[in-house]
């Protein structure tokens, strides 16, 4: 479920995570995507998709809608993940389907699995 966190909510990385793709799918709301088979994930509610420019990535199913026999993005979306090491502190922006969308201290944003992060209770 999509959840927007209050401004100033932070998380800390518990484990190292290296992103898998440097230039994944990015689409604007209303743009068409093709849902592809053949990629498996243990996280339910995500589909492997290709955009009009040929880039691919995982997209939350709840962010897609059927239109004219295909799929469109319901909101702007970028599948870019962040890389972290234990102790990295990031601002938590929102969550969806087992992943957190965060901003690092350099201002870069991206997705991280929620299982490798913990809420930072220090204010």
Image (cartoon, helix red, strand yellow):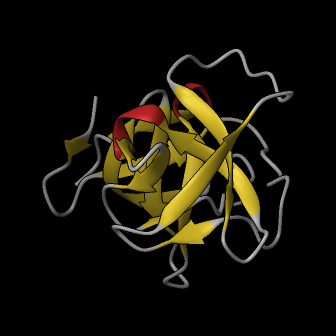
Determine whether 16 is above or below 76 in the image.
above
In percent of the image, x 55 and y 84: which residue is there?
A: 106
Determine whether 66 is above or below 41 in the image.
below
In percent of the image, x 86 and y 27: which residue is there?
A: 38
| Left or right for 81, reference 106 | right
In percent of the image, x 22 and y 55: which residue is there?
A: 123
| Left or right for 20, reference 42 | right
| Left or right for 50, reference 21 | left
Give the total of numbered labels: 0
Q: Quadrant of residue 63?
A: top left
Q: Quadrant of residue 13?
A: top right
* Viewer-closest of 97 and 115: 97
Q: Position of residue 91 (x, y in %)?
A: 37, 62
Q: Position of residue 67 (x, y in %)?
A: 36, 48
Of the 4 image quadrants, the one containing the N terminus is: top left
Farthest residue, direction left = 6
In percent of the image, x 66 and y 58: which residue is there?
A: 81
Regarding residue 84, the answer to whether it shows in the image is: no
Farthest residue, direction front = 68
Regarding residue 113, the answer to whether it shows in the image is: yes
Determine whether 18 is above or below 103 in the image.
above
Q: Position of residue 86 (x, y in %)?
A: 70, 46
Determine whether 24 is above or below 41 in the image.
below
Q: Position of residue 36 (x, y in %)?
A: 74, 38
């Amino acid at each position: 479920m999509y959840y927007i966190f209050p401004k100033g909510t932070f998380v800390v990385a518990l484990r190292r995570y290296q992103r898998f793709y440097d230039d994944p799918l990015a689409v604007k709301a209303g743009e068409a995507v093709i849902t592809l088979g053949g990629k498996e994930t243990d996280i339910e509610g995500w589909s492997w998709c290709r955009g009009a420019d040929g880039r691919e990535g995982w997209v939350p199913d709840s962010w897609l809608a059927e239109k004219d026999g295909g799929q469109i993005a319901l909101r702007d979306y970028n599948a870019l993940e962040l890389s972290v090491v234990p102790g990295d502190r990031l601002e938590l922006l929102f969550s969806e389907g087992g992943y957190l969308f965060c901003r690092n201290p350099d201002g870069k944003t991206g997705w991280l699995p929620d299982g490798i992060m913990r809420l930072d209770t220090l204010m």
